[in-house]
Image (cartoon, rainbow, N blue to C red):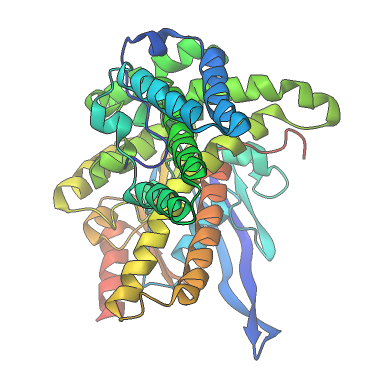
Amino acid sequence: MIEFRGVAVSVPVLRAGRLAESKTLLAGVDLRLGERRVAVVGANGSGKSTLLRLVNGLVEPTSGSVVVNGLDSVADGRKVRSEVGFIFTDPLSQLLMGTARDDVELSLRGIVPDKAERRRQATELLAARGLDGVADQSVYDLSGGERQLVALTSVLACRPQVVVADEPTTLLDLRNRNLVAEALWGLEQQVLVATHDLELAARADRVLVVDAGRVVADAAADEAVEHYRRMMS
Amino acid sequence: MNGLFSLYAPGDSVFHRLPVGWKYLIMFAATFVGLLLRNPWVSLGVLAAVTLALTACGVGLRHALGLPPAVWLTAGFLLAYQIAVGAWATGVVVACNLVGALYASRILTATTPGPVLVDALVAAARPLRFVGADPERIGLAVMLMARSLPMMWDAFGQVRDAARARGRERNYFALVAPVVVRAVGYAQATGEALMARGLGERRSR
């Protein structure tokens, strides 16, 4: 369960070289997200990413609080991050090691002390996603879809309860987009996805529409996506 | 991307089987012998030895020996300059030491998986626990620093191309600010990626 309790986020802005009034990125967010598949849609700069980043403490609320499975995202930041896996738009900024296997092993460092066991588990996790053929390839030589799947595998290696993905299909072609969408929506964990891809959003159990820092619609997929289409036309 | 350091390539050469500590030792020895003795024949000998050793790693000649063109240009420029000022021996020492050090580091990186390198760094940093340092964080930091070098080089190339597209490729000062901005952005993204996986965070809050 992810709860947003009266959350607002604002940042100071520079005006004429001085810190002036703050800019509100999100305001008045009160949500209880218990559904397994939740999508967040909204225009660029609407506050989607900020909303997602609040969930694992990458962004801290200016007021209010975010609670994930009973843990406060600020006070229990470290525990929350161990429960929430985060997938970025650009997998290259997320993959920290040179090869897929090494990257998954890095995720396992804090969980599996034995080196040989770590390597075995990394190999197994990659094979489960059909990535065994690229395990020792440079992450720079992988396709966009493969990179995103490796990023997902690395995140899942940390054994999160919740997976948050910030526009995971934005940089992908249709085939890779479908691959990543299948992988994400097929997860056992609760999944929260921000996306511009309305086909992806339409498969969620619940969709939030964000506009100018506020949740302006919160409904089942068909209704919320339709609301968003009307809003954008 | 095959940057300054070569990426790990699986294999069963003698260097793949050699314990990582020995490989670190070979890297430091090959680098510092040339630096300390400053003799052109020694530097040439070290370069020949590490080239042969790297070839024996069985990771493919291109993967092993291919360096970014800028490295060859830098080595060539330094050699040519020293010859022009009548110090050919210094030119040979500097150019051979530069390429030799990179090849020596590749013996390590091309034959050792990344996590093993991190483990070795963490083990080496373990005595620093007594002064309050976290060996795990030090190991990660060194690995990330090594990873950032090709990324920064790539950023410089992209900014230079963007400047070239506007006919401003000769204004090197104009390239600095965007490269610095990208470096900061890269550092922030890396920090967020580490944080998102709970890596490198302090144990107690």
Q: Is residue A197 above or below residue B119?
A: below
Say which residue appears at 54% left-offset and 13% top-offset. Answer: B22
- Eyeballing the image, is A178 above or below A60? above
Which percent across, then down, holds residue A173? 18, 53
Q: Residue furthest left?
A: A175
Left or right: A85, with A143 as reference point: right
Which residue: 41% across, 61% down?
B156
Seen as rendered, the residue at the extreme bottom is A16
Q: Quadrant of residue A135?
A: top left
Name the one closer to the observer, B163 or A141.
Answer: B163
Percent x, y for residue A221? 29, 58
Dividing the picture into quarters, in which one does residue A218 lie? Answer: bottom left
Residue at 66%, 44% in the rendered image: A77
Image vertical order of residue A150 relative to residue A166, above or below:
above
- Seen from the viewer's position, the closer of residues B104 and A43 is B104
Residue A205: x and y, percent? 33, 49
State whether residue A90 appears in this view.
Answer: yes
Q: In the displayed image of the protein, which residue is found farthest to the right?
A: B131
Residue closer to the observer: A30 or A152: A152
Residue situated furthest front in the rendering: B86
Against A200, is B106 above or below? above
Q: Quadrant of the N terminus of chain B?
A: top left
Compared across the picture, whether A152 is left or right of B26 comes to left
Image location of residue A209, percent across then percent down: 39, 67
Quarter in which the C terminus of chain B is drawn: top right
Observer able to see residue A130: no
Number of dots carrying numbers = 0
